[in-house]
Image (tube, rainbow, N blue to C red):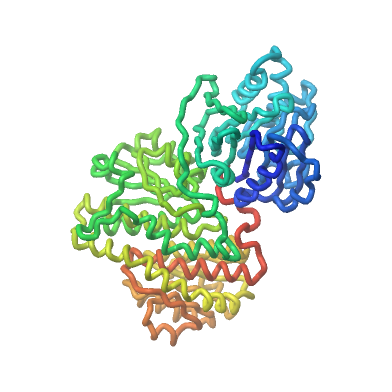
């Protein structure tokens, strides 16, 4: 959602420069507007992202501390007046905020009635006026700002990650978290607050992740953490094992292309230390603590949103076919609004790249309330879902900066394959079957490397079809979710109409759309559904529709039927989505690039959705 960054230290008066550089690494979280506040120099805000903010920064903008923000609009249009930071009536208390204050209307009404004047349409501004209200009512003295902030926080309902600063105590910054991530960065004579570690890493790798309901106070040489009831919290710092260099483009024009090209390495990292091919086993250390419970599980419910949801649909096929466990896949955004039937023999498996997706997180919490075992497949170490689930598997995919998920999706499928082996061997999967899956998993990085060498030809293909305004993606069985994901990628970065469809469902409605201007991407590997897919392609060609086929290497017959072919190395059915999705990612990338669109930051989207 939004990105916040705060700094206090003794590095001259370059807080402004430090904060601006940090915001650059947070731009994937929001880019509707940007702002910065230094107690010594005041505030600067603007619609747009960091480049626009930098243009407005005056030369004398100096200070030893400050707070900064990138906004993805939820309440109020993305204008300068709605940009963060927001101030109180006197311009002394300032806040940056990620989330939604659910009771802001009633709080605002009360504050307006008592004489406060609001300058924005944002729900966030109510925070500063609340703190101001409590500060004026409290006895002046030591920690009065902290007490006022704590009193205000106890009145707020909703989702938030907050950094607060008071002009009269400029070296002190207060952070708070409730459902929206907050990380503290600990340096020698400087401290940081951020939405995630990326802007902190150039300065220190020592971080502390706040938990929900916790508040932190930082100054240049110390930090304290306590709960909303003022109870002190002691927590050791975590050392982040990836560097700021990992988040750079490494010569690629866009993060999205870089992250697609990292696919082979991502698979290797997800598999590292987890395969025992000689025995056909998967070793998942994150599940060892609940291994006995997993043996008794009778049903798995996968909860996820967006691309992770489509990964879950592939996982459903894997787990039911090879592990013999009934699986349901639910949208995290719907799960908690019905009455799911759960018990101690149900496992709720959450899939999320960020580990902070609010809908998925709330599904986990609902599962816990109803007595289910909760598991996670997440990429971000220390994230909320990783901490709140009973056990889980880390992707180890590294940071994903592009808003459209690519390498995270591949790593999620790989992790689901490992989970299938782990649970399958508990339930009767033979060692022979386990060895086949293990050996095919080991072969995937080399096969994907070969596939990626076709990126120039996929670029040419995307240019050929870049004038299209509609696209149909067809798949069956394991590759039905891949069709959904391919359509999503094209929609979210090129803004055209694209639909994913089960090929067998095409004649129940979607085929009515087909004509010579409505091309189809058909995922047709030489698997158990191949002949069915060929029949569906014939139906499209009979209606003058253009067809691009994603086909298995060596399949010359399909080339006689379709208009264009992208060939993919052969693998077993359950792993074919890991390879087949990559041409669709590349096609979407080059399609959007040809249209001159911002591939890494598609409009109206943000990387991590931490509000409803």
Q: Is residue 586 above or below residue 101?
A: below
**In front here: 240 or 605?**
240
Position of the N terminus, as image quadrant, is top right
Q: Tell me where residue 318 sits by quadrant.
A: bottom left
- At 69% from the left and 39% from the top, the residue drawn is 15
Name the image quarter holding residue 428. bottom left
Viewer-proximal residue among 478 and 224: 224
Instruction: Tell me which residue sits at (34%, 39%) in the image.
Output: 373
Q: Quadrant of the C terminus?
A: top right
Q: Is residue 263 left or right of residue 92?
A: left
Decide which of 453, 351 is in the foreground and name it: 453
Residue 528 or residue 250, whichever sits in front: 250
Judged left or right of residue 435, residue 395 is right
Let me know if residue 612 appears in the view: no
Q: Residue furthest top?
A: 139
Name the spot of residue 75 as percent of width and height, x first.
68, 41
Residue 599 place in picture, x, y as percent = 61, 62
For residue 523, above or below residue 609: below
Q: In the orientation shown, which residue stands out farthest toward the bottom?
A: 560
Query: Residue at (51%, 66%) from the top-left corner?
Result: 585
Image point (48%, 70%), residue name = 583
Work out whether residue 299 can be spotted: yes
Q: Is residue 554 above or below residue 159?
A: below
Numbered circles on residues, count: 0
Pinpoint residue 558: horizontal percent, then vertical percent.
41, 83
Q: Left or right: 532 with respect to 2? A: left
| Residue 414 % position (x, y) | 37, 58
């Amino acid at each position: 959602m939004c990105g916040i960054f705060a700094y206090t230290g003794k590095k001259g008066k370059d807080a402004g420069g430090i904060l601006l550089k940090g915001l650059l690494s947070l731009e994937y979280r929001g880019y509707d507007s940007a702002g910065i506040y230094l107690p010594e120099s005041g505030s600067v805000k603007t619609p747009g992202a960091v480049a626009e903010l930098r243009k407005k920064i005056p030369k004398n903008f100096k200070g030893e501390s400050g707070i900064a923000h990138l906004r993805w609009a939820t309440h109020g249009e993305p204008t300068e007046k709605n940009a963060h930071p927001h101030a109180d009536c006197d311009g002394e208390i300032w806040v940056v905020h990620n989330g939604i204050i659910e009771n802001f209307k009633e709080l605002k009404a009360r504050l307006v009635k008592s004489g406060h004047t609001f300058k924005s349409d944002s729900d966030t501004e109510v925070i500063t006026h609340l703190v101001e209200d409590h500060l004026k009512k409290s006895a002046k003295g030591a920690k009065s700002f902290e007490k006022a902030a704590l009193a205000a926080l106890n009145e707020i309902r909703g989702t938030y990650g907050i950094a607060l600063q008071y002009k009269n105590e400029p070296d002190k910054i207060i952070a708070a978290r409730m459902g929206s991530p907050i990380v503290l960065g600990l340096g020698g004579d400087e401290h940081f607050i951020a939405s995630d570690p990326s802007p902190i890493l150039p300065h220190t790798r020592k971080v502390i992740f706040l938990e929900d309901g916790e508040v932190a106070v930082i100054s240049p040489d110390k930090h304290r953490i306590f709960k909303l009831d003022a109870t002190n919290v002691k927590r050791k710092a975590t050392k982040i094992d990836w560097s700021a260099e990992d988040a750079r483009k490494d010569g690629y024009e866009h993060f999205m292309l870089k992250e697609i090209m990292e696919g082979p390495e991502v698979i290797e990292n997800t598999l590292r230390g987890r395969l025992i091919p000689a025995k056909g086993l998967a070793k998942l250390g994150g599940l060892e603590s609940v291994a006995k419970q997993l043996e008794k599980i009778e049903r798995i419910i996968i909860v996820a949103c967006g691309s992770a949801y489509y990964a879950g649909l592939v996982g459903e096929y894997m787990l039911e076919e090879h592990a013999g466990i009934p699986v349901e896949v639910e949208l995290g955004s719907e799960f908690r609004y019905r009455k799911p039937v759960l018990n101690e023999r149900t496992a709720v498996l959450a899939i999320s790249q960020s580990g902070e997706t609010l809908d998925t997180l709330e599904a986990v919490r609902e599962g816990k309330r109803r007595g289910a075992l909760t598991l996670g497949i997440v990429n971000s170490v220390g994230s909320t879902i990783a901490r709140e689930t009973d056990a889980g598997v880390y992707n180890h995919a590294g940071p994903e900066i592009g808003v459209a998920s690519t390498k995270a999706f591949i790593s999620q499928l790989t992790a689901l394959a490992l989970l299938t082996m782990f649970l399958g061997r508990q339930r009767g999967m033979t060692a022979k079957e386990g060895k086949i899956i293990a050996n095919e998993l080991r072969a995937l990085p080399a096969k994907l490397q070969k596939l990626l060498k076709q990126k120039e030809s996929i670029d040419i293909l995307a240019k050929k079809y870049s004038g299209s305004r509609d696209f149909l993606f067809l798949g069956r069985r394991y590759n039905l979710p891949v069709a959904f994901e391919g359509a999503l990628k094209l929609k979210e970065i090129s803004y055209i109409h694209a639909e994913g469809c089960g090929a067998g469902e095409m004649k129940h409605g979607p085929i009515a759309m087909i004509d010579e201007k409505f091309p189809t991407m058909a995922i047709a590997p030489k698997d158990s559904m191949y002949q069915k897919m060929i029949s569906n392609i014939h139906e499209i060609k009979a209606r003058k529709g253009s067809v691009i086929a994603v086909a298995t290497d060596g399949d010359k017959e399909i080339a006689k039927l379709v208009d264009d072919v992208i060939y993919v190395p052969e693998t077993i059915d359950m792993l074919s989505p890991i390879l087949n999705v990559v041409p669709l990612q590349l096609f979407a990338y080059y399609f959007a690039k040809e249209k001159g669109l911002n591939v890494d930051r598609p409009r109206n989207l943000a990387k991590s959705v931490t509000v409803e």
